[in-house]
Image (cartoon, rainbow, N blue to C red):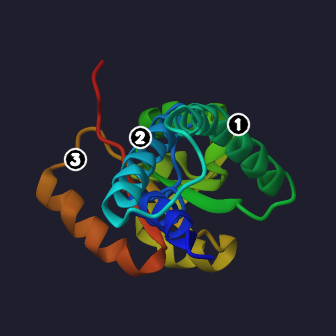
Amino acid sequence: SDRIYMLLLWVSIFWYEKLYTKRHAFWEEPRILIKGTSIAFALITVAVFITKVYVPFSRAIMAMAWLISMLTLPVIRYGAKSLLLAVGILKKKVIVIGSTESTATLIEDVARNRTLGFSIVGCLTDDRAQVGRTTAGIPILGHFDEIERIKDETGFEDIIVTFPNIPRDRLIGLLKTWEGLSDTIRYIPQTGD
C-alpha cells in the first residue's frame, strides 16, 4: 500500500501519453507504450532513490521487470483491444468526408488497420453526381452539406475528412461547421502523388 504511488505514476504517464484516450495505429501504439513504460520506470527509480523507500528488489530485477513489461504490455494490450473490438465495445461509427478519389484510399487504409476500431458507415462527397454509388465498397450517402441528416440516419460518432485540393479557409469553415456533430474530427491531408 505504501508503494501504490508507483502504480499511480505508471497510470499517469500512460494517461499523459494518451494511451487511454486516443486511438493509435497498430505500429504507433507499441512505440508509445515502450516510451511510456521507460519514462514510468525511470521516474519510479528516481522516486525510490529520493524517498529512500526500501524496495526488496535488486537493480537487476528492476531492469528485467522493465524489459519484460516492454515486451508483454504491447502484446497484452493488443489482445485486450482485439477482444473488446470483437465484442463491439471499442467500435466507433465513422463517416468519411472528401472527394471520391481521396476517400477510396483512406477507406482501404482504415480497413487494413483494424485495431483503430473504426466502422465506416458511409461517405459524404463534394460531387453530387457520386451520391448513391460506392467507393471502396462503402456507400456514398450524400453531399457534405447534408451532414445533419446523415448524422440522424447513421448515428456516426467521428468524422474523417480528406479533401486534397480544398482552399484552407474553406476547409476551416467546414470543420467549424461540423465541430458539434462528432466526438472527434480527423483531417487527413494530401501526402503526395
Q: Can residue 118 be seen in this view?
A: yes
Q: Quadrant of the C terminus?
A: top left
Q: In which quarter of the image is residue 55?
A: bottom right
Quick check: 124 above or below 102?
Answer: below
Identified by mark 1, the residue type is Val
Packing grade of label 3 (10 A; few <14, some 14-19, many >=20) is few
Residue at the disc numbered 2: 35
Packing grade of label 2 (10 A; few <14, some 14-19, many >=20) is some
Could you tell me residue 63's position as x and y percent? Answer: 52, 34
Quick check: 54 above or below 25?
Answer: below
Q: Identify the residue shown where x is 29% and y is 34%.
A: 190
Q: Is mark 3 on a helix, strand or loop?
A: loop
Question: Separation of disc 3 and disc 2 at Cα?
Answer: 36 Å
Tell which of 77 and 167 is nearer to you. Answer: 77
Could you tell me residue 123's position as x and y percent? Answer: 56, 53
Tell which of 35 and 85 is nearer to you. Answer: 35
Q: In which quarter of the image is the N terminus?
A: bottom right
Q: Is mark 2 on a helix, strand or loop?
A: helix
Identified by mark 3, the residue type is Ile
Mark in front: 3 vs 1: 1
- Give the mark nearer the N terminus: 3 vs 1: 1
Packing grade of label 1 (10 A; few <14, some 14-19, many >=20) is few
Tell which of 91 and 132 is nearer to you. Answer: 91
Residue at the disc numbered 1: 75
- Give the mark nearer the N terminus: 3 vs 2: 2
Number of marks = 3
Residue at the disc numbered 3: 166
